[in-house]
Each structure stands twice: as structure tokens, then as C-alpha cells.
């Protein structure tokens, strides 16, 4: 294998059956081999039993999305075979447990009736009986290498070698399965062992049993099926790298950005960010900083509120006291926070609200993807509520945007909504130390009052830049008000004061639009002279960039306008790019094409061509590519994409 | 410097109706602050929405007028970020027990050092006299088109069940007694509730000054052996029945005073210190986050669990 190493591995099984750890170990395995990795988990809102899977992809150059078909499917149960049999490439191999062979589809209780019906119809057309063994036979007949593992026996062997019983090693079945897949891909067992060591860091007995299981599985595959040609090392060998989910990396960005108080109410898919930050609440400082400050560790307080109303209002209180505060939530939580967003606009309280979008409306699908809260965020809050809304497109952007949001909040004394989504939350990406350099975003706490005497301090002083020097409670006498107020923060219904104060709120955000560099608001990728412009936002960035590479190979040149700053909106720039394009295509994961609406509101430009995805599943490279091609070649106005189980 | 109660007065016109109970509460607050000699900038009164919630504008301390129902979480946020700030929540019965009841309950689990002044007049004043959660069943105050068909919440019992560690009731026109209670509440190492009965001369024509003054009496005057202080679980087991008995007394007789003061429950700040060493020294509002604008932690320094050596 050479330059074109681009391998996708999928592992599926019941929730609670080790899918998460399998994905994590696979990612680490490929990283240790020197490759860049992108992996995403799809799962039900369920703790045990429902179908869940990871799609992990590795390349020499960082993959930004996943794709179908995959090169290897690992089935920890029969449902995975029925759900994904048509997502494997003709040269792929499928690893499964021989005990699932006799399972008929109808006996799989967690499998949803709609899925059974659809799969049943497909299999009928193919003339395949809906029994696992028949589907595997069908795959085999189509040239796919099917690799059945006698997991029960392998567990017995593992237990014997460890001088223990089968029950205590039962959880290693997923390690055996991914080892088999890795072996067939040409990855040595030592690399898998290292991966196990990293993933189960410090848990010796778990490591021992998983390493033994990996060896047993590796030997079995070697003896019975033969291992793949050794895969060459990727370009990233001998480095100290990191792999993190979007949830993780936003926690890292917040910590680096000086967050000292995070409040939250548990909601998927935001909770893992708060959890992870909580795990690292008592954190180690960089050595130079530690020397300078004379402390090795400092703290960030992560506090669970009684609801999202409490969460944001607590963050507001913390900010007034002088802490750098944030809260994290998802769409339903954002609904509850609307009132306090309006309060923080009116009272000019710096606070960051990280919104991990998921599939709505209403409770929708808690663990599924959606980009449906764009307009909700921009217009969140009653009354005129100018604020900053920034949407990140990938992990690295999410990291820096988390840091910048904390700065913007304090500099402009405003709520900042940081939009991320389930796709980013539960996908993993490999990166290097220099990819997350906090020194690129110096801490900016904005204008602070240092001189005024208590009696003279005006919390809402009218200034030329509309920003009043701030002070924490405790240092100045002040009034903070959700009512219309004068410069001192005292309630007033004087019409002229009201007008001045409302203009203050909107002008400072307008100024933010002028001061924040374009590079932090919008990106233009691809061939700058291309006549076709793709427009999108958030995590649709990854599959679009990957699809553009494929289009380029077809001779189709495109450029891609990825809009990040949703408020204040970069109207002039967007307008210029769109008006100089011949064909504009909007791509997003919502039914209304919300970004296209926002673009039209700000620029008057009406984007006619749209690609949307509403299934709650990740947009993938191949479908973005196919859909873009359809629009470009067939001049189709709307393409609805729907791949992925 | 010893401060006088008038040092805590602002120049604002006080917008309450003549004879409003809030005047008594305002004066009691100012007197309590003066007697405790609290620095104005280090003291915060946090209110919700309604007549009583205008109080922040009338007291010269660093105050916050929040949203309807949300003064408690805002106050909690201040206290989490800076435990040294003295924080008092002053809000109405509708605010704290209606729209904000969830926060009222959750606060009890935390036992933060906060003082909750419940301005309890049983009606929504600023929206012209609707029934509040403390208005008894079947009462028909003058603005209601029919007698109240919802029964009343007992704020003392709710606070007790939620875990408040200082529970008292007072009467707005007894300024000095109320002032003394506020001082005790502020100094209490935990969450304190003072349910302050107050007439609303404009909208509550039933629970008037005369109505209250016929009924109220002080627990410690009626029973010199009255002891609301709890120092241990055994103490609690012994005294709880009598405390509950007094908390539920309502009607011909309405007791005032301290019902319950538990000093054996750990407050939140030292609980946090146990899971986050250094919290009290460097609370969120005071801990360094940069050195000359330079961030002080790189992810590779702290998040070692995500590092992979390739």
C-alpha cells in the first residue's frame, strides 16, 4: 500500500458491549502505526442492548469525515450483519462470531421493526434468507472475505493461558474481534498491544487479559485465514500525539482559555464535555507558569445545576463576581436558557454557552446529529438580543473557538453562543501538540475599571466604544439590572436613556463584527477562481472538504465558503463571494436550510441549490460527493442525502 | 468605620404603595447591614421580579436585579465564584415559591451560605393581585374574580424538607426583631430562610395588618424553653417533632422566630474544597488564568490520558 492508504473499519454491536472501547482501541492502533485518524460513533439513546457502531478511517493526510463502503466490518452481533451488510466494499472482509450464524433477523428484539422491514425487503430482492449465516454466505459469494471467529473457544484459551475463568475474560471479545480485523489489515500484534496499553492506561489486570486475548485472536487468524501484508508505517511515527473527541477538545479549550467555573445540567450530547472537564478540574500548569505562580496545580469548578435555567443563571452570577464562566447544553437546554440569555444581553454579562446541537425538534433523537439550532441561537432571547454566535466546523476550530469565545464574552460583555454538534461531540480525531497551541489565543479580559471610586463608578457608563469598564462585585459599588437602566444600573423608564442603552447593546456587537478578524469569522477553501461555490457551516465542513478532493480528481473545481460567525454576520464578505459565483450550493443538516435563510436575510442573496440531510446520521464523504455531483451535473435544486444506518 | 443604616440608603424614590410591608423589610435590611458593618461593595442583594424585588435599587450595596424566579441561581453563582461575598436573596412569594420553586428546593441540598428573605404577602402585587403560592385555599382577596381554589405552600416545611439549616419567620412591621433575625441569618454558615409575613394593603384585603397582629406571637416568648438549635443527629431526632409541630401551626395563632437552626451540616464551600483542593484560596473569581495574557496550561500538559506515543 502506498499513497492511497485510506482505510475504513466499522465495528458494530449492542450498546454496552464494548463498542466504545473498540473504537477507541482501533483509533489508537492506527495512530501508533503513524496514520491520521477520524472516527465517529453512531448510537441509540439507550444504555444497554440497542445497536451502536463506530466508523473509523485512517489515512496519511488527516481524514475529515467518514465514508462508505468500509474496508472491514466487525460484527459483535447478528444485528450488525443485517444492518451493515450492504455497507462493505467488494474487497473488504467481515469479521464475526460464529455463534451468531443461526440467528434469524426476526429474533433480534432490539432491532427496530422499520429497519427489519426495510432490510427484509432488500434481502428478499437479493434472494437471501434473513438469517445471519445466509447473509454471510451472500457476502462470501460476492468476493468478500468472511472471517468467523469461534469466540467462545478463544475465550477459553485466553482464560487457560491466564490461569483464570472464562467469566473474568468475557469482556475481551471485542478486543479479539478488532485484533482479527487489524491482523487481516496487516497490522502486527505489538501495535495492538500498545493500543490496549494506552486505552486502559494504568489498569493492569484489564490490560493483561486484553493483551492475552489479542494474542490468542491474532494467532487464530494467522493460522486459519492468514494475516494481511504488513501495512507500512504512516508519516506520523515517533511522535507524542493526541486523540480526542469534540467533547474532550472543547473541555481542553475552555481550560486553556482560562475558564474557572462551568455550570451544566446533564443533557446529551453535551454532558461528556462537562464530565471530562470535571475529571481534570484540578489541573497541572505548564512548567513555566507553575514556576512563575508558585503553584503546581489550580482548579476549575464544574457544578451541576438543577436545570438549565439554574445553569445559565449561576454562570451569570459567577461572571458578575469576576469568574470566567461558561455553561454547556444542547437544543432543549438552550430553549430553557433563552430568558437568561436575554438577561445577560441586557445586564451585559460575559458568559459562554456551548451548544452541542442534536436531532430535534423537541426531544427528537438525543444521540443523533442535527444542525437545527442555528436560527434558534442567533435569535435566542426575548427583546432585541444582539450577541455573538460562533459555529465551529471541526475539532481544532472548536478548541480555538472555545478559547476565543471566552475572550469575546469578556471583551464585549455579552453572552457568546458557541455552536458545535453531535458529529463533533462523538467523533475522534488525531492531532499534534502544535495543533492546539493555546498561546495563539492570548487571554483578553476586556476593559476593567481600576481607578474609579466606589461612589463614582458607573457600571453602564456610556463610552465611545459602547463598552463600560467592568468590575467584579466585591470591588465596586454597582447595580446590575435586567430592567432598562441608566449608567449606574438604576432602573429608569426615561425614553431617551432607554434608546441610548439599547443602541449601546447593538453597537458594541456591531463593533465586534468590525474588530474580530475575518479569518476567525469565515473561511474560503478550495480553488479561489472556481465558479462553483459551496456554502455550509459547522461540522458539514469535513465531508465537504473531503468531497471537494474527489470532485477535483473529476476535474470539477469548487470553492467552499464555510461561515462560522453567525452573529455579527460577515455580510459584506459573504455577499461578495456569492455574487461573484455562477453556481452556489448550500449544504446543511436541517430541513429549512437555515444558513441559506440567514444568508438571504443579511445579503439578499437567494441560494437556490440545496443539499440537506435529515436522518440524524453524519454527513459522509461519498454522499456529499455524489450529491454535489448531482446538483452540478443535473442542475437539480434539492438533493436529500440519507446514507448510514 | 462604623456605618449607620442611612449609609445604605440610595437616592432612588421608593416606588411601593403607602403602608406596604416592604418598607419595614427595607429598613430592617439596612439596619442589619449597618450593625454588621458590611462593606457595600462586598455585599450583594439579589432579587427576582415583582414589587419586593425592587429592593436592590434602594440599598447601597452591589446589587443585582435578575429575572422572575431566578435570583437564587444568580446568587449561588456569585457565591460559588467568590465565597467571601455576602449574598442576600430578597424576593417575593411568587418568585421564590412559584416560578422559582425548583431553585428554592435545590438550594437546600447545597447549604451555601446564603440568606433568603421571602417577602410573603400571598399575592402577586405588580401584576395587580393574583393569588400567590402562599395564599390559603378559598380566600378571595379583592382582585380575584373567584375564591382561591389552590391551597397554600408552607415555606417553612418546604425549606425544612429541602435541607435549609436556618429557618425562621418574621413580620415586616416588627423591624427590630426582623433586623436581628437577618443578622443571625447572614452570619449563619449555611442556607437561611426568613419567611417574612407582610401585608399588601393594596391587594390583600384579608391578610391585613390587623389580621396578622391578632395572630402572630414569638416562639421564645410563648415558651422560654424553646430551643431551635441542632448540634447533632441525636439532637435532631429529639427536637424535630416539636419543630415540625410549630412549623405547621397556622390559623388562629401564627408563630414567629427561629424554628430551626442546624449547625451540624457542612456548608458547600468546604465540601467543594474537599473535591477541589485550593478552592477556598483560589475561588473561580480570584484564581489566575493567565500570566501577562499568556494562557497557563497546554492540553498536552494536563490531558495525558489522551496522549498516544506513535
Image (cartoon, helix red, strand yellow):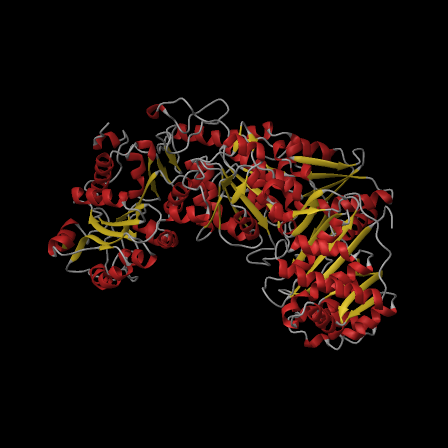
Q: Is residue A615 above or below residue B126?
A: below
Q: Is residue A542 above or below residue B59?
A: below
* Residue B86, horizontal then vertical, whole percent: 32, 39
The answer to whether residue B183 is visible is yes
- At x 57%, y 52%, the residue is A272
Viewer-proximal residue among B55 and B187? B187
A423 vs B68, left or right, is right
B251 vs A390, left or right, is left
- At x 70%, y 71%, the residue is A160
A314 vs A40, left or right, is left
The answer to whether residue B147 is visible is no
* Residue A135, horizontal then vertical, whole percent: 80, 72
* Residue B37, horizontal then vertical, whole percent: 25, 33
A513 vs A101, left or right, is left
- For the C terminus of chain A, which image quadrant? bottom right
Q: What is the quadrant of residue A439 in the picture?
A: top right
Amino acid at each position: 500500500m502506498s499513497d492511497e492508504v485510506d482505510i475504513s473499519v466499522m465495528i458494530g454491536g449492542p450498546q454496552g458491549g464494548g463498542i466504545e472501547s473498540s473504537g477507541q482501541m482501533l483509533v489508537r492502533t492506527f495512530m501508533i502505526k503513524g496514520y491520521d485518524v477520524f472516527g465517529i460513533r453512531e448510537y441509540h439513546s439507550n444504555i444497554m442492548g440497542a445497536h451502536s457502531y463506530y466508523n473509523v478511517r485512517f489515512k496519511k493526510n488527516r481524514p475529515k469525515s467518514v465514508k462508505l463502503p468500509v474496508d472491514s466490518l466487525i460484527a459483535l452481533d447478528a444485528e450488525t450483519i443485517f444492518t451493515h451488510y450492504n455497507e462493505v466494499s467488494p474487497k473488504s472482509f467481515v469479521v464475526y462470531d460464529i455463534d451468531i450464524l443461526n440467528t434469524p433477523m426476526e429474533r433480534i428484539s432490539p432491532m427496530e421493526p422499520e429497519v427489519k422491514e426495510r432490510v427484509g425487503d432488500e434481502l428478499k430482492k437479493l434472494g437471501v434468507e434473513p438469517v445471519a449465516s445466509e447473509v454471510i454466505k451472500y457476502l462470501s459469494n460476492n468476493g468478500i472475505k468472511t472471517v468467523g471467529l469461534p469466540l467462545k473457544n478463544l475465550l477459553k484459551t485466553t482464560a487457560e493461558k491466564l490461569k483464570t475463568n472464562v467469566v473474568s475474560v468475557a469482556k475481551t471479545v471485542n478486543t479479539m474481534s478488532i485484533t482479527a480485523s487489524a491482523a487481516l489489515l496487516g497490522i502486527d500484534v505489538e501495535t495492538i498491544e500498545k493500543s490496549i496499553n494506552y486505552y486502559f492506561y494504568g489498569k493492569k489486570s484489564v490490560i493483561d487479559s486484553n493483551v492475552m486475548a489479542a494474542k490468542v485472536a491474532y494467532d487464530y487468524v494467522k493460522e486459519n485465514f492468514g494475516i494481511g501484508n504488513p501495512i507500512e508505517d504512516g508519516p506520523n511515527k515517533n511522535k507524542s500525539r493526541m486523540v480526542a473527541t469534540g467533547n474532550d477538545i472543547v473541555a481542553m479549550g475552555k481550560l486553556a482559555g482560562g475558564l474557572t467555573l462551568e455550570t451544566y445540567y446533564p443533557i446529551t450530547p453535551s454532558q461528556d464535555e462537562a464530565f471530562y472537564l470535571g475529571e481534570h478540574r484540578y489541573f497541572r500548569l505548564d512548567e513555566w507558569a507553575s514556576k512563575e505562580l508558585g503553584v503546581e496545580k489550580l482548579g476549575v469548578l464544574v457544578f451541576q445545576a438543577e436545570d438549565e435555567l439554574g445553569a445559565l443563571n449561576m454562570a451569570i452570577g459567577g461572571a458578575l463576581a469576576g469568574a470566567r464562566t461558561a455553561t454547556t447544553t444542547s437544543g432543549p437546554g438552550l430553549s430553557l436558557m433563552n430568558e437568561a440569555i436575554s438577561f445577560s444581553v441586557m445586564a451585559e454579562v460575559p458568559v459562554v454557552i456551548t451548544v452541542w446541537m442534536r436531532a430535534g425538534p423537541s426531544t427528537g433523537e438525543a444521540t443523533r446529529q442535527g444542525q437545527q439550532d442555528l436560527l434558534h441561537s442567533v435569535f435566542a432571547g426575548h427583546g432585541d438580543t444582539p450577541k455573538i454566535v460562533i459555529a465551529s466546523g471541526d475539532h481544532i476550530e472548536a478548541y480555538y473557538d472555545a478559547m476565543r469565545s471566552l475572550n469575546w464574552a469578556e471583551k464585549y460583555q455579552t453572552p457568546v453562543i458557541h455552536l458545535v454538534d453531535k458529529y463533533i461531540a462523538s467523533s475522534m480525531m488525531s492531532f499534534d501538540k502544535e495543533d492546539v497551541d493555546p498561546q495563539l489565543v492570548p487571554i483578553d479580559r476586556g476593559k476593567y475599571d481600576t481607578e474609579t471610586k466606589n461612589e463614582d463608578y458607573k457600571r453602564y457608563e456610556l463610552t465611545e466604544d459602547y463598552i463600560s469598564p467592568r468590575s467584579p462585585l466585591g470591588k465596586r459599588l454597582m447595580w446590575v439590572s435586567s430592567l432598562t437602566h441608566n449608567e449606574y444600573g438604576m432602573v429608569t423608564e426615561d425614553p431617551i436613556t432607554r434608546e441610548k442603552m439599547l443602541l449601546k447593546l447593538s453597537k458594541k456587537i456591531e463593533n465586534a463584527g468590525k474588530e474580530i478578524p475575518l479569518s476567525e469569522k469565515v473561511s474560503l477553501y478550495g480553488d479561489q477562481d472556481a465558479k462553483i461555490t459551496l456554502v455550509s457551516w459547522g461540522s458539514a465542513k469535513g465531508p465537504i472538504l473531503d468531497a471537494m478532493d474527489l470532485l477535483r480528481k473529476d476535474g470539477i473545481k469548487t470553492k467552499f465558503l464555510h461561515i462560522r460567525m453567525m452573529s455579527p454576520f460577515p455580510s459584506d464578505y459573504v455577499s461578495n463571494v456569492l455574487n461573484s459565483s455562477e453556481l452556489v450550493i448550500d449544504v446543511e443538516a436541517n430541513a429549512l436550510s437555515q444558513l441559506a435563510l440567514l444568508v438571504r436575510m443579511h445579503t439578499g442573496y437567494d441560494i437556490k441549490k440545496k443539499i440537506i440531510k435529515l436522518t440524524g446520521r453524519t454527513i459522509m464523504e461519498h454522499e456529499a460527493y455524489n450529491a454535489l455531483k448531482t446538483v452540478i451535473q443535473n442542475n437539480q435544486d434539492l438533493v436529500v442525502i440519507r446514507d448510514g444506518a | 468605620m462604623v456605618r449607620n443604616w442611612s449609609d445604605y440608603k440610595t437616592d432612588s424614590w421608593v416606588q411601593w404603595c403607602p403602608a406596604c410591608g416592604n418598607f419595614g423589610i427595607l429598613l430592617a435590611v439596612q439596619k442589619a447591614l449597618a450593625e454588621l458593618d458590611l462593606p457595600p461593595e462586598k455585599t450583594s442583594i439579589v432579587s427576582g421580579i415583582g414589587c419586593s424585588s425592587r429592593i436592590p435599587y434602594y440599598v447601597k450595596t452591589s446589587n443585582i436585579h435578575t429575572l422572575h424566579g431566578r435570583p437564587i441561581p444568580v446568587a449561588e453563582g456569585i457565591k460559588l465564584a467568590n465565597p467571601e461575598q455576602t449574598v442576600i436573596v430578597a424576593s417575593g412569594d411568587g418568585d421564590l415559591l412559584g416560578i422559582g420553586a425548583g431553585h428554592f428546593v435545590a438550594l437546600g441540598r447545597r447549604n451555601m451560605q446564603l440568606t433568603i428573605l421571602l417577602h410573603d404577602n400571598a399575592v402577586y402585587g405588580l401584576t395587580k393581585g393574583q393569588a400567590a403560592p402562599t395564599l390559603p385555599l378559598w380566600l378571595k382577596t379583592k382582585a380575584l374574580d373567584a375564591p382561591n381554589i389552590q391551597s397554600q405552600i408552607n415555606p417553612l416545611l418546604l425549606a425544612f424538607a429541602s435541607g435549609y439549616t436556618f429557618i425562621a419567620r418574621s413580620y415586616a412591621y416588627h423591624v427590630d426583631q426582623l433586623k436581628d433575625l437577618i443578622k443571625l441569618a447572614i452570619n449563619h454558615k449555611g442556607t437561611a430562610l426568613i419567611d417574612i409575613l407582610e401585608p399588601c394593603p393594596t391587594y390583600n384585603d384579608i391578610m391585613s395588618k390587623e389580621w396578622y397582629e391578632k395572630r402572630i406571637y414569638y416562639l421564645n416568648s410563648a415558651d422560654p424553653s424553646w430551643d431551635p438549635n441542632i448540634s447533632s443527629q441525636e439532637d435532631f431526632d429529639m427536637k424535630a417533632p416539636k419543630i415540625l409541630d410549630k412549623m405547621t401551626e397556622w390559623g388562629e395563632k401564627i408563630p414567629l422566630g427561629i424554628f430551626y437552626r442546624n449547625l451540624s451540616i457542612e456548608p458547600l464551600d468546604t465540601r467543594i474544597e474537599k473535591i477541589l483542593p485550593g478552592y477556598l484560596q483560589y475561588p473561580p473569581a480570584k484564581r489566575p488564568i493567565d500570566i501577562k495574557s499568556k494562557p497557563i496550561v497546554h492540553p498536552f500538559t494536563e490531558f495525558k490520558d489522551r496522549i498516544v506515543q506513535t
